[in-house]
Image: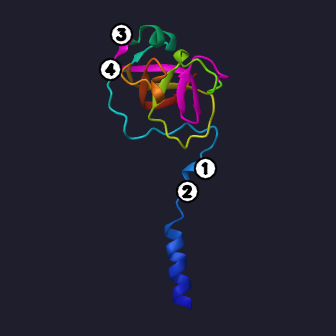
Amino acid sequence: MKPVLISTMLLLSACSCPSPTGVSQHAMPTVNSFCEHHIGVPQSVELGELLNNGHKYEGKAVSVSGYYSLGFEHSALYPDAGVDPYTVDFSQGIWVDGISPFFDGKEVHVLLTGIYTQKSQGHLAQWPGSLCVAQIRPAS
């Protein structure tokens, strides 16, 4: 009986990895691996500039700040906090790829750096463009 107990304890200790759902509400989300991490020197751009003149930034590395909104089938950056993902005008934000779905924060003011494109327009092609995120930092 003792070897069974020891074997069970060893197996359980090997499986004691922390759960990704235990992310603190104030922790920054993680970046998924499918977005390019070596993007060169990004150009700082206002979110409004991306929304109005996105074609100028097609395929380029940019840094943009805004409020990240996460919800069911929703991952986007907006200029203002308080966005309701079920009633928002999607043309006022950009889709965000590459942030872990396990991030549990809402309306976090962030500075995102990544590659911008209008070729991908997010879930159901509702946004004017998207950003594949390489880096996330708190906005100052």
User: Furthest residue to the right?
Assistant: 82
Check if mark 4's residue and mark 2's residue have beta carbons within 8 Å: no
CA separation, marks 1 and 2? 7 Å
Find disc 2 in the rendering and name its residue: 18
| Secondary element at image label 2 | loop
**Residue 35 image point, x, y percent:** 37, 34
Find disc 3 in the rendering and name its residue: 56
Report the front residue among 2 and 84: 84
Kindly report which numbered mark, 4 or 1, lies closer to the viewer in this rendering: 4
Report the front residue among 57 and 136: 57
Taking the magenta stretch, the answer to whether it contains residue 54 is no
Report the front residue among 105 and 24: 105
**Residue 15 image point, x, y percent:** 51, 66
Find disc 1 in the rendering and name its residue: 22
Name the quadrant containing residue 18. bottom right
Pointer 4 or 2: first along the chain: 2
Say whether residue 11 is left or right of residue 69.
left
CA separation, marks 4 and 1? 34 Å
Amino acid type, residue under disc 2 in the picture: Pro
Q: Residue at x 53, y 23 (%)?
A: 77
Q: Residues within 10 Å of mark 1 (few under 14, many from 20)?
A: few
